[in-house]
Amino acid sequence: MTASTSAPALVVEDLTKVYKGRTVVDKLSFEVLPGRVTGFVGPNGAGKTTSLLMILGLAEPAGGTALFDGRPYRQIERPLNAVGAVLEIAKGHPGRSGRDELRCQAATHDIPDSRVDELLDLVGLADAKGRRSAEYSLGMRQRLALAGAMLGDPPILILDEPLNGLDPQGIRWMRAFMADQAEAGRAILVSSHQLTELQQVAADMVVIDKGRMIAQGPITDLVSKSETGSWARCTDPEALERALADAGFAVLRQDGDGLRVTGASGVQIATVALEHGLLVTELYPLVANLEQTFFDLVDGKEGPA
Amino acid sequence: MIRLIRVELLKLITTKRTTGIFLAVSMGLCLLISLLNLLASDDIDTSQDILDVLGGAQVSALFVVLIFGAVNMGGEARHGTQVATFLATPVRWRVIVAKSIAHALAGVAAGALNVLVGLLCIALFADAPWPSGGDLWLQILGGTVGGALIGSFGVAMGAVLRNQVAAVAGTLVYLLVVEPLLGSFIDFFADYGIFASLGTVATAGGSDGIAQGTGGIVLLVWMLSLTALGAYVVEKRDIRG
């Protein structure tokens, strides 16, 4: 690895994509810093993969730039030495072994086969390197793709849904891998739906929805902005909702008959219920976390950052 | 570029089962057609007849080489390997050119093997006098050059038409149906179409009054034009798996 400065490893500015007259990514801007894991999250269809494809020069943006050390991906002379990428859409040839798959990539940069073997060992595929990649499990394919991304020892890794389909052991391995790489100074941009897992490893987060960025920053800052409150269920949720609203609390119906009450403690909710003769069946405080923050952001409770 | 050609050759070698099957089918087809012509026809009396048998079998067998190129280029999209390919080499036209050259080399190998198989059949089953050394060399040269050009042409078609099945079917329909149909109305296609040019280059001395070298140059122009088109299309296309 070569870069360990604090300058952003990736600068995305006003990145825009239009498909058949529809804007699917709209002036997306963010930065990815070395030594940190940046989560890239958004609901399905938010434009995450399209954004990554544009960042990696695989799709042509309608506007904007994505620069690695000042250069767009397609102008990097030895891209495997500059950026490592694992994309969900990438696959291996079903007739080629895992090792040969990596050899074909390595040969484009004159990277020796010994490096291929070293990485297969690192990702725990040394014993399976001769097997055809079609015979690999999803987890093994993810590891193989990671080894491919590491071939050129790049200062930044871009990982698209690396936790998808992994068993708990695989998730733990991947989390540790990302943490180790960030600690070694690499910048990591990781898109994932698994927010709880992401919270354990990511330092920063970029949230997009419908192609637009709705929040960006350190996860601790974003989570601390999330409104806390209490969660309640009642035998007559409509009545409790009305009573709480009349008492001046903000109430949001979630998960069927659940009530998310902002700014109210459990005691306050219980008191209101008691005054109205309502039976509360579930009551506990909500703790701010990434998942709740994400839902708050996507539900429009926060404006653009 | 040499490094990229090596990479593309490595891809062919590391999918040796597919590569081997295509080479074997091409050879088998050449063997079968040579045998059928030699055993079923009573009119093979002259050295020119021998060359015609050899040329006809080679042209048919080279269709397998064409399909090989189209399958391998279309396979990059079908199998999703194009993502890794274009991440490692973002200037995509270079990949197309390297793949084209690698398949030209594979086409040379297939063409040479086909000639060997054809000659073996002739040695075993033909009673007609052997062609002169010069004619035989021209036949061998035509078979290998034809193999090289048609292998590259297959890659070009796989680049233009991303879908693997469409690339193979579309190319075959064009060569076997559309072009002969066009040739019956427009002389240019009958003389200088892709299929006609392949027949000309793969026949010692050429065919229908067109010199073998001219057929080779025309086929080269076709191949270069379609490769340029394929490289342009791939360069502009969004890669989505």
Image (cartoon, rainbow, N blue to C red):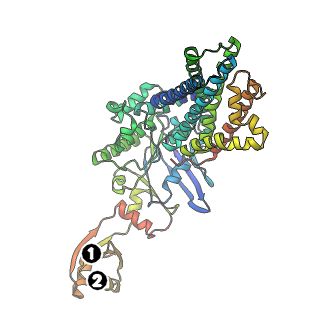
The answer to whether the residue labelled 2 contacts the one labelled 1, judged by CB atoms less than 8 Å apart, is: yes
Residue A243 locus on image (x, y percent): 30, 86
The residue located at (34%, 34%) in the rendering is A125
Amino acid type shown at disc 2: Leu
Q: Number of marks in the image? A: 2
Question: Which element is circle 2 on?
Answer: helix
Amino acid type shown at disc 1: Ala
Q: In this rendering, would B219 be left or right of A133?
A: right
A65 or B130, nearer to the observer: B130
Residue B174 locus on image (x, y percent): 65, 43
Mark linked to residue A42: none
Residue A127 locus on image (x, y percent): 32, 31
Q: Which residue is mark 2?
A: A240
A95 or A189, nearer to the observer: A95
Instruction: Give the chain of mark 2.
Output: A
Q: In this rendering, would A226 be left or right of A25?
A: left
Dot 1, crowdedness within 10 Å: few (<14), some or many (≥20)?
many
Question: Residue pushed farthest bottom?
Answer: A276
Q: Which residue is mark 1?
A: A232
Above or below, A185 against A215 in this view is above
Q: Going from the N terminus, do you reach mark 2 or mark 1 first?
A: 1
A94 or A44, nearer to the observer: A94
Above or below, B94 against A259 in this view is above
B160 or A156, nearer to the observer: B160
Instruction: Give the chain of mark 1.
Output: A
Residue B162 locus on image (x, y percent): 57, 45
